[in-house]
Image (cartoon, rainbow, N blue to C red):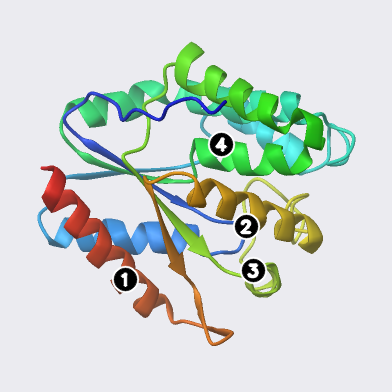
């Protein structure tokens, strides 16, 4: 059983940009924010995890730096709680912006928790894992539900190449964190993202490759903006 995905009841809109590590979520979220602002939209943006801003965000950084063990050693139920706690600490910011009627953009959100933890779960526990994460995030923590999820669909090989080009990040001293360093893991996470998108009408998939060649940031951004602006116009 999959919990029903009802949108939140606020006057704003919650739009989430998702994808595997290295898919370009941060870049595309920033470009979408700038484009919507230039169109006189009132926009508020948050990126998850909030490594430096919340207690649980700092613990997520510890997890990704291997302080609690390898990916195989940390049970996905426990990893999910770290990410959910980070969002719970940020709920007031999100809800206030939505109540003010703003367009809220999230670089990663609850779908990330689902995709990553379902990847790690044993097959017989996958349905229970999805129910449990959605129950914690949406019911216990009362996190607002997305109105739209945009999935940046790229290959793990392409993502790994882009990860290698990233500048140093504050939350890790390594070139790549636990998730980023395992290309096979990213391939499996991508499968979970695609499954989530295929089973939820609130998702829109944007292919980042055309004929196996990476599309330009500008071209991808234009497609995202065109779809999102049309979506907003229909909803407001």
* 25 to the left or right of 178: left
Whole-number angstrom distance, CA of label 3 to CA of label 4: 24 Å
Whole-number angstrom distance, CA of label 1 to CA of label 2: 20 Å
Q: Nearer the viewer, mark 3 or mark 1?
A: 1
* 73 to the left or right of 196: right
Neighbourhood count class around disc 1 (C-alpha, 10 Å): few under 14, some 14–19, many 20 upward: few
Q: Earlier in the sequence, mark 3 or mark 4?
A: 4
Neighbourhood count class around disc 2 (C-alpha, 10 Å): few under 14, some 14–19, many 20 upward: many
Above or below residue 168? Residue 122 is above
Tell me the number on the disc at residue 52: 4
CB under 8 Å between discs 3 and 4: no
Quarter of the view holding residue 121: top right
Residue placed under numbered mark 3 in the picture: 159
Q: Earlier in the sequence, mark 1 or mark 4?
A: 4
Q: Secondary structure at mark 3?
A: helix
CB under 8 Å between discs 2 and 3: yes
Residue placed under numbered mark 1 in the picture: 223
Residue placed under numbered mark 2 in the picture: 21
Q: Nearer the viewer, mark 3 or mark 4?
A: 3
Seen from the viewer's position, the closer of residues 190 and 104 is 190
Q: Earlier in the sequence, mark 2 or mark 3?
A: 2
Whole-number angstrom distance, CA of label 1 to CA of label 4: 32 Å
- Residue lying at 72% horizontally and 30% vertically, measured from the top left: 79
Neighbourhood count class around disc 3 (C-alpha, 10 Å): few under 14, some 14–19, many 20 upward: many
Quadrant holding the C terminus: top left
Q: Secondary structure at mark 4?
A: loop
């Amino acid at each position: 059983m999959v919990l029903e995905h009802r949108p939140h009841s606020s006057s704003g809109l919650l739009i989430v940009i998702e994808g595997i590590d290295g898919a370009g979520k941060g870049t595309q979220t920033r470009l979408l924010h700038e484009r919507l602002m230039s169109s006189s939209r009132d926009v508020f943006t948050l990126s998850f995890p909030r490594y430096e801003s919340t207690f649980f965000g700092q613990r997520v950084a510890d997890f990704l730096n291997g302080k609690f063990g390898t990916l195989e050693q940390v049970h996905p139920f426990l990893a999910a709680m770290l990410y959910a706690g980070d969002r719970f600490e940020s709920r007031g910011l999100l809800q206030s912006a939505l109540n003010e009627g703003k367009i809220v953009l999230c670089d990663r959100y609850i779908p990330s928790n689902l995709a990553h933890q379902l990847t790690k779960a044993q097959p017989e526990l996958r349905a229970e894992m999805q129910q449990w994460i959605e129950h914690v995030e949406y019911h216990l923590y009362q996190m607002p539900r997305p109105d739209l999820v945009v999935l940046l669909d790229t290959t793990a090989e392409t993502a790994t190449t882009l990860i290698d080009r990233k500048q140093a990040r504050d939350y890790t001293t390594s070139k790549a964190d636990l998730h980023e360093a395992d290309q096979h893991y990213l391939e499996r996470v991508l499968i979970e993202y695609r499954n989530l998108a295929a089973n939820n009408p609130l998702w829109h998939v944007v292919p980042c490759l055309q004929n196996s060649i990476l599309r330009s940031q500008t071209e991808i951004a234009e497609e995202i903006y065109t779809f999102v602006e049309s979506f907003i116009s229909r909803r407001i």
